[in-house]
Amino acid sequence: MRGVPTQTQRPLVVPVRDGTDHLRVLIANERQDRLALVGAIVMELGHEVIAREIDVEDVGPVTARERPDVALVGLGESSEHALALIDKIVREAACPVIALLHAPDPAFVKEASKRGVFAHISDDAVDDWQSSIDIVLRRFAEYHDLEGAFGRRALTERAKGILMERHSINEGTAFNMLRDRSRVDNRKLIDLAAAVVDGHRLLTEQPQTSSES
């Protein structure tokens, strides 16, 4: 396994995989030398380093502005500094954060996981970086799909609750109101639910169906 080069090692030549997606990557570490080394590896993998950050106060705004595809945060001299970087990025980013470790550190991994890190990879496994990033991106997409499904369900439940209270009806009737109106208006049910939750005076009465005509 090839590791991140030290000052006494020759620079790495990391082959670019055929078909690799070009990613916009943010890297963060309290050590400037590590930023340079990790940045070189990321570029040799065929990706773009959009920001190199050290300061905790700057990394959040930079993340919000640049919207990276993935963020790599290295564990430098201080685990607290690395955890603070992770916390700021996770709060701002719609992207996964991966921790880079130069040695096993279960305590740090545990704390980083609490702050939203999606995975950790070793400096000693540079050959595996790209495959690890690919896996993390897939898991992140699946997570957001699931989160979106839960969010849509919660929104529909809130809309049903509003209709139940407004019209003194039961849950089934409230859902039927949403469903029938979505058919009549040719709109997605989730869009109607959002409108109800936003306070619009929709569904003041149940639309007539063909059987009621």
Image (cartoon, rainbow, N blue to C red):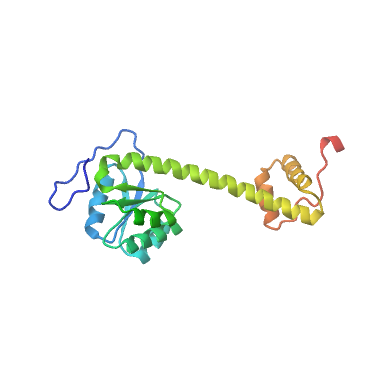
Residue 45 spot, x, y in % from top left: 28, 42
Specify whether 180 is left or right of 102: right
Q: Is residue 44 visible?
A: no
Quarter of the rendering occupied by the N terminus: top left
Seen as rendered, the residue at the extreme bottom is 57
Residue 105 position by quadrant: bottom left
When the figure is inspected, residue 5 is found, relative to residue 85, above or below; the finding is above
Q: Residue shown at 76%/43% (left/top)?
A: 176
> In this view of the protein, which residue sits in the foreground, 174 or 203?
174
Q: Residue shown at 79%/45% (left/top)?
A: 173
Residue 79 spot, x, y in % from top left: 32, 61
Quarter of the rendering occupied by the C terminus: top right
Q: Residue shown at 59%/47% (left/top)?
A: 150
Residue 131 position by quadrant: top left
Seen as rendered, the residue at the extreme top is 18
Residue 91 spot, x, y in % from top left: 45, 59
Residue 20 position by quadrant: top left
